[in-house]
Amino acid sequence: MTSDSIPVAAPVLNGNERRYVLDCIDSGWISTHGAYVPRFEQAFAEHIGCRHAIGCSNGTAALHLCLAALDIGPGDEVIVPTLTYVATANAVRYLGARPVFVDVEPDIWTLAPVAFAAAVGPRTRAVIPVHLYGHPAAMPEILDIARATGIAVIEDAAQAQGTSLAGRMAGSLGTLAAFSFFGNKTLTCGQGGMVTTDDDRLAERLRHLARVAMHPDRPYWHDEVGYNYRLTNIQAAIGLAQLEQVHWHLERRRAVAAGYRERLAHLPQVRFQQQRADVRHGHWMVNVRIDAADADSIVACRLALSERGVETRVGFPPLHLLPPYAEATPSSFPVAEAVSRESLTLPTHAALTPSQLDRVCDGLAAFLARREASLRPAS
Ligand SMILES: Cc1ncc(COP(=O)(O)O)c(C=O)c1O
């Protein structure tokens, strides 16, 4: 990458981040105690519109804590869409439970409710809908099925900061929700996570588990095996500063997503994730499907863009094809496999300029024109 390269993701730290971090250093509160942790948690709960927000070390830890707080363990099954980042299934495995994969919907690429309903069995304890790329999963249908079958709903909202459905924020729709503040996320604190919930009992249990299950009044007295999953004051300081600017971050991402749609509208081979009614898309990343692409053509396309200084990513490989999960999952999931095969993730971050968007889109259009020409029979 050179200085005029366009990274696929980049944090923008243009608010109070520096001031708050210096405050942590000057005051000496750099570890897991300090005022920024409760301030960030409270502000995040208000932003989501829920009673509790519990900070933790990253999004994977947040998912792990949600499942642990529900006492999920060996012999239990948790339903997971196969098209997601690996953490969604890993968290289930950490507890000795089994992730049961299901396919996704062809338009929005999130957990297919019909497939979910068919996968519920006597051992199913929970479902983890993932709001992929910032589009909410079909929550009304998923919640109806979960209610009818008595299972918990954990939203994987790692990619869904600022996403809402029918006026309610992602993170306030299920029993529990997990967020990530990794460096490429809409709001970041380098590494960090948050669990949101309205359930007082689960919130208390989660806090306890995240703090090594230490008795609040008896130092070094741990009443069960807990986890050291606390957020640091420095992480919370950065997170709070980012949250103060959340509307700006979201507006910028929406402008970037709209910019791509406008510039690529003339290319019939490029398909976007559709947006359902009543949805406010968080636009974590703009991922497009390139019609009839396979692994080789995606590699060639990424190389062509990289030669123009544009960094891209491939789509997530469906989890049922990854070595830790393949053996236990003999089925195939055609929609997830097709979306993954044809996926190209374009640079998406708050600092992208219109001329950078032009460069990405011109590069993609030029590659596709060359591909079309090479497929045309010679006359
Ligand atoms: C869908 C999903 N779930 C969970 C995570 C895990 O978050 P973290 O990287 O903070 O552990 C991510 C991170 O990218 C994610 O995309």
Image (cartoon, rainbow, N blue to C red):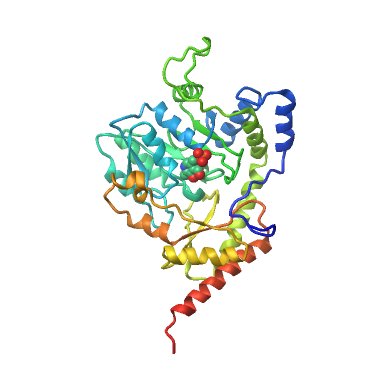
Say which of 281 and 263 sits in front: 263
User: Which residue is at 67% across, 52% downward?
Assistant: 351
- In this view of the protein, which residue sits in the foreground, 121 or 89? 89
* Residue 368 appears left or right of 142: right
Across and down, in percent, residue 80 comes to 37, 43
State the quadrant of the N terminus: bottom right
Question: Does any portion of residue 341 appear in the rendered image?
Answer: yes
Can you say which quadrant of the picture contains the C terminus?
Answer: bottom left
Q: Quadrant of residue 53?
A: top right
Query: Residue 149 in the image: x percent, y percent?
Result: 29, 36
Q: Residue furthest bottom?
A: 379
- Residue 171 shows up from this direction: no
Q: Is residue 276 left or right of residue 306?
A: left
Identity of the residue drawn at 56% across and 32% down: 45
Q: Residue at x 69, y 57 (%)?
A: 3
Q: Residue at x 72, y 28 (%)?
A: 25
Residue 136, horizontal then vertical, whole percent: 47, 47
Q: Position of residue 356 (x, y in %)?
A: 66, 62
